[in-house]
Each structure stands twice: as structure tokens, then as C-alpha cells.
Image: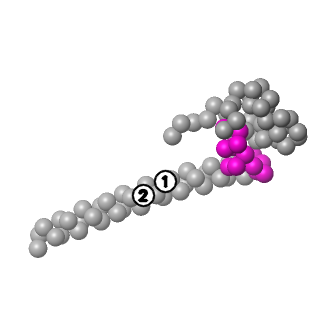
Amino acid sequence: MKTSRFTDSQIIAVLKEAEGGTPVPELCRTHGISNATFYKWRSKFGGMDVSLMTRMKELEDENRRLKKLYVDAQLSADLLRESLAKQW
């Protein structure tokens, strides 16, 4: 997955500026982001502070790791089933 050029605290700062009344096009121009990026950030991180954002990213990483473990377990179970089926 592509990593962001912006840190969590920078994203939160941009969103706080928008809540403060800065027009979105001007905000996007000064920070070098597109309107789509701003609105994606707002939908994903709106109303969060840095600690909540960090916790959410930790949970996403853990979820990704658990999904990978599940897929590996399923793959090994399928291989066992196939080998048992060939024996009988």
C-alpha cells in the first residue's frame, strides 16, 4: 500500500484548519493536496484527534495481520484435505 506524504498530525492539522473556517480550495492549494484527498481525509478522519487516529491505524494493521493468518490457515487446511482425498 502506498504511504502518505503527510503524517497523522499533519492531516489532523489540515482538517482543523478547515473547521476553523479556511475555504477548502485555498487550503488544498496551500498544502498541495487535491479536493478529493481533502474530502477523503475528512470522511475517514473527521472528528478524530491524533491518538484516535494512531489507534485506528494500529487496529487496521492488526486486522490485516489476522486476515493474512486466516488465509494461511485456510490454505494449509485445503492442502491437507486434498492430500487426504488422494490417499483414499
Q: Badge 2, how many Cα within 10 Å: few under 14, some, many 20+?
A: few
Q: Position of residue 35 (x, y in %)?
A: 70, 35
Residue type at mark 1 is: Arg
Q: Is residue 3 left or right of residue 84?
A: right
Marks 2 and 1: CB-CB under 8 Å?
yes
Q: Which mark is residue 65?
A: 1
Q: Image point 75% across, 49% down: which residue?
A: 46
Q: Position of residue 80 (x, y in %)?
A: 24, 65
Q: Image point 57% across, 36% down: which residue?
A: 3
Quadrant into which the C terminus falls = bottom left
Predominant SS along the magenta part: helix
Q: Image point 88% across, 39% down: which residue?
A: 21
Q: Position of residue 34 (x, y in %)?
A: 68, 32
| Residue 47 inside the magenta-drawn segment | yes
Does the image show residue 7? no
Residue type at mark 2 is: Leu
